[in-house]
Amino acid sequence: MTFEWGDLFAGRISGMAASEIRELLKLIDRPEIISFAGGIPDPDLFPSAAMARAYEKIFQSNAGAGGALQYTISEGYTPLREWILGYMEGKGVRLGLDEVLVTSGSQQALDFIGKLLIGPGDLVAVTKPTYLGALQAFSPYEPRYVSIAMDDEGPVLADLEAALAARPKFLYLVPDFQNPNGVTVSADRREAIVALCAAAGVAIVEDAAYAELRYDGEALPSLAAIDAARNGGRPATVIHCGSFSKTVVPALRVGWVSAPRDVVNRLVLMKQAADLHTSTINQMVLHDVVSQIFEPHVKRLRVAYKERRDAMLAALDAHMPKGVTWTRPQGGMFVWIELAPGRCGVALLERAIKEANVAFVPGAAFFADRSGANTLRLSFSATKPDRIREGVRRIAGLLETVEA
Ligand SMILES: Cc1ncc(COP(=O)(O)O)c(C=O)c1O
């Protein structure tokens, strides 16, 4: 009998396809490459000193160090959950402690939500494009996807209504400066989405990973806040995922999920099964850092990233050939480019790396229905303005030769 691991893999593994662009992106880890591929925060902006002080404080306190290095409860470090409660209340959502679970990044919350809500063949509504990591988290639970078109105010309502008629379990949405296309759902559209989903008995999973990184305009109410306002201040039909990865640091791996108690109770059971709890010391450090510096630190990030967003938009305006369009995000980390129909983002990436030492992510991976071959995601967050200008000029140069 021959032994084949592949014969032993569970059927759901077929839903976990390796990304075809990963091999290409392995080539970009060279200093001469200007990379817009990452979608990561700039390490020069990490609050390293505040974090060092927080670790030191913990280790200097005998009682604290013991507790910090010990197992803790699955729900999360209580002072951190209390901080999250205060933060959410400031945004119009009144939660009890048992309505918040700390997760190992918001990515873990997406996995748990998939595990909680998706059975094989269940329908999940997503936008096109949507966050690739959400598709990766949900797909092992073997959903079918219904994809909703977007315009510059968010999901197109006629498409949403058609999707809701097919009775998906939930709609997954990134309302602020969406990864990958930078689109922000307008205030009216938010109200309509919450009302339509509630009327159809469809839950909403709101991913607010970028919500704090707004560079222009007024902050808009979260879907969780709209849901709460319709229900006496309490969460009802929206599961809200938050993250400290973009506002503090990703490496601590701390995020959270808030939802009605019945939902959180189940998610806590999943947390126990997955990893018992998120690192105790990381939660304590994060709590110390956000208690000391959250607001001023986020303000500093906004100033730095706004300058980069502006540099990228100005460079696109100056250099891009006719037939290419792009979004003008009010925040976040991404600009989304649409090439003329028939152009291929993957082919352009191959040339960009080999001929121009510049990289980005081709957009097709962000579509559950595999459309979007002529799209690109450019991240401006981890690149300084001069390099942004030069990188955009190089991409435009390549396009001049193929688009003409
Ligand atoms: C939209 C969105 N959601 C969730 C995540 C996961 O973030 P984390 O697990 O670091 O909180 C990311 C990371 O890039 C993201 O872009």
Image: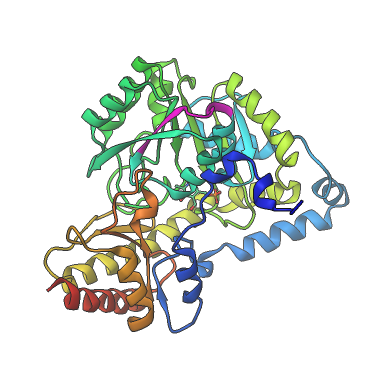
Locate residue 67, reporting x and y percent.
83, 45
Let me know if residue 118 is in the magenta part.
yes
Point out residue 12 in the picture as x, y percentages from the top left corner: 57, 39
In the image: residue 286, left or right of residue 63: left
Residues drawn in magenta: 116-126
Kindly identify the residue that appears in the image at 50 percent across and 30 percent down: 89
Q: In this view, does 334 lie to the left or right of 278?
A: left
Q: Reply yes or no: does residue 261 show up in magenta.
A: no
Q: Position of residue 273 (x, y in %)?
A: 73, 35
Q: In this view, does 197 lie above or below 77?
A: above
Q: Which residue lies furthest to the front in this view?
A: 1
Task: Out of 95 and 260, give the one closest to the viewer.
Answer: 260
Is residue 179 visible to the viewer in this orientation of the structure? no
Q: Kindly identify the residue that appears in the image at 18 percent across and 70 percent down.
A: 320
Residue 306 position (above or below residue 242) = below
In the visual, does 128 lie left or right of 247? left
Q: In which quarter of the image is residue 301?
A: bottom left
For the point 60% across and 31% down, the residue is 100
94 or 318, which is in the foreground? 318
Residue 230 sits in which quadrant? top left
Q: Where is residue 317 in the image (x, y as percent from the top left)?
A: 17, 68
